[in-house]
């Protein structure tokens, strides 16, 4: 069983931010600390005979994209402050637009862009933590 990562710390949010920075680099994701999460291990097909770090990277990437998708649902026609969280992460991590340009495209000041990004990453970290908690509970049964 993978090492238990403390999902209730500020360091966990930093790990999620770092993993998002490497969203399309499966090699790095496969060696990332978050690749040891139970939910990542659980999502790898059980019939896989040889498990590589790239398989772990792909599973972690899918977890992060799933968490981003959860966040995107807040953006569906909603005018709340949470509604602008996903577009910031979309520009930054999915489309890989430079921060200054992303802020301009979204009509935000750079300081608002950075503040919103921090908040959005915290939301993603909480979504990942919730998935991990559920997986751990299911494994205990």
Image: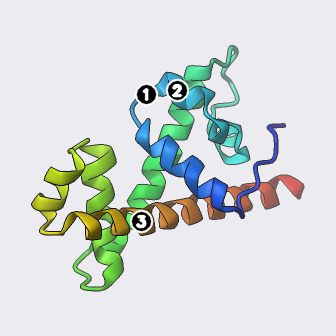
The residue beneath circle 3 is 120
The residue beneath circle 2 is 28
Q: Mark 1: give few (<14), some (14-19) or many (20+) Cα within 10 Å.
A: some
Q: Mark 3: give few (<14), some (14-19) or many (20+) Cα within 10 Å.
A: many
Horizontal side of residue 11 vs 84, given as left or right:
right
Q: Is residue 48 above or below residue 107?
A: above
Q: Which mark is residue 48?
A: none
- Mark 1 or mark 3, which is nearer the start of the sequence? 1
Q: Are marks 2 and 1 in contact (CB under 8 Å)?
A: yes
> Residue at position x 55%, y 60% from top?
125
Towards the viewer: 18 or 37: 18
Towards the viewer: 107 or 123: 107
Instruction: Estimate the x, y position of residue 112 in percent, counting from the top left.
Output: 27, 71
> Residue at position x 12%, y 68% from top?
107
Q: Secondary structure at mark 1?
A: loop
The residue beneath circle 1 is 25
């Amino acid at each position: 069983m993978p090492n238990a990562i403390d999902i209730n710390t500020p360091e966990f949010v930093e790990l999620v931010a770092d993993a998002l920075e490497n969203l399309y680099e499966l090699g790095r994701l496969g060696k990332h600390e978050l690749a040891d999460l139970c939910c990542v291990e659980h999502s790898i097909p059980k019939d896989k005979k040889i498990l590589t770090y790239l398989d772990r990277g792909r599973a972690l990437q899918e977890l992060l994209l799933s968490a981003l998708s959860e966040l995107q649902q807040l953006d569906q026609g909603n005018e709340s402050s949470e509604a602008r969280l996903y577009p910031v992460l979309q520009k930054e991590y999915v489309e890989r637009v430079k921060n200054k340009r992303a802020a301009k495209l979204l009509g935000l000041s750079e300081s608002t862009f950075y503040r919103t990004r921090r908040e959005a990453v915290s939301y993603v970290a909480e979504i990942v933590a919730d998935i991990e908690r559920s997986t751990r509970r299911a494994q205990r049964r």
